[in-house]
Image: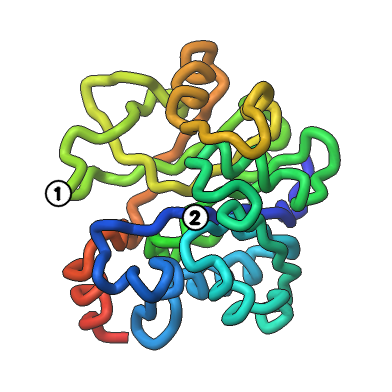
Amino acid sequence: MSTAPIQHALILCAVRGERMRPLTDTCPKPLLKMQGKPLIVWHLEQLARAGVRQVVINTAWLEEQFPALLGDGSTWGLSIRYSHEGAQFGGALETAGGMATALPLLSLPENSPFWVLAGDVYMPDFAFPVADSARFAASKALAHIYLVPNPAHNPDGDFGLSPGGMALNKAPEQFTYSTVGLYRAALLAGTPVGHKAALSPLLRTAMQSGRVSAALYSGTWTDVGTPERLAALSALPT
């Protein structure tokens, strides 16, 4: 089993973030600053430490601000490319549609796993573990997702977790999908480029055939979905 880190990642940044208005009227949510740096930069720093080298960022709302601020990624030792859904298709394509459209830019070797995460969550200690990616690469799973304890705004959770580490559509105890996961392109087979498509139905279908593994992450995690949550995080001691 290979212990080399996965070198490709996709950061989802296309949505406008209506609940974050008025802050997002002039700034995309992943570029809002938290403790002195944009939310997405926390991810870029962690990805670089984990050995990731190629990153694709999908964009739609105020998308010109991303390359203007982040450039080609060389600041973090990364190579960043952009999937501009707004300019190419007139708006955000939802999660699966955005992933399918961005995949060609990742230049993945056939069947190679890649990381996916949302640019507007705060997970400063998540290390993109090599051991997890090695297990996933050696498995037949189509996805490996990280679940977190349910926050107040999602009390019913999203998915269950079996004792054997498989994601379940429904279980007595449900957890919230953190937005971070390992994926294979095969999960998106049949998802057309440039069209809107949700990720949840694809994951749930794959779960029914036992092809989505999962792990519970208990570290710091916040869906930075409102100005109040951003303000609370910004007030924490550094």
Rendering coords of residue 14 (x, y %): 49, 55
Q: Nearer the viewer, residue 181 or 130?
A: 181
Q: Nearer the viewer, residue 67 or 183?
A: 67
For disc 2, the marked residue is 14
Q: Which amino acid type is marked by label 1?
A: Ala
Q: In the figure, 143 relative to 116: above or below?
A: above
Instruction: Examine the rendering and report whether any part of residue 129 can be seen.
Output: no
Circle 2 crowding by C-alpha within 10 Å: few under 14, some 14–19, many from 20: many
| Left-right relation of 170 to 128 | left
Q: In the figure, 95 relative to 42: above or below?
A: above
Q: In the figure, 88 relative to 126: above or below?
A: above
| Left-right relation of 200 to 140 | left
For disc 1, the marked residue is 152
Rendering coords of residue 182 (x, y %): 59, 42
Q: Are marks 2 and 1 in contact (CB under 8 Å)?
A: no
Sooner in the amino-acid sequence: mark 2 or mark 1: 2
Q: Which amino acid type is marked by label 2?
A: Ala
Quadrant housing the N terminus: top right
Q: How many marks?
A: 2
At x 46%, y 29%, the residue is 165
| Left-right relation of 105 to 32 | right
At x 51%, y 29%, the residue is 213
For marks 2 and 1, give the one nearer the viewer: 2
The answer to which quarter of the image holds residue 54 is bottom right
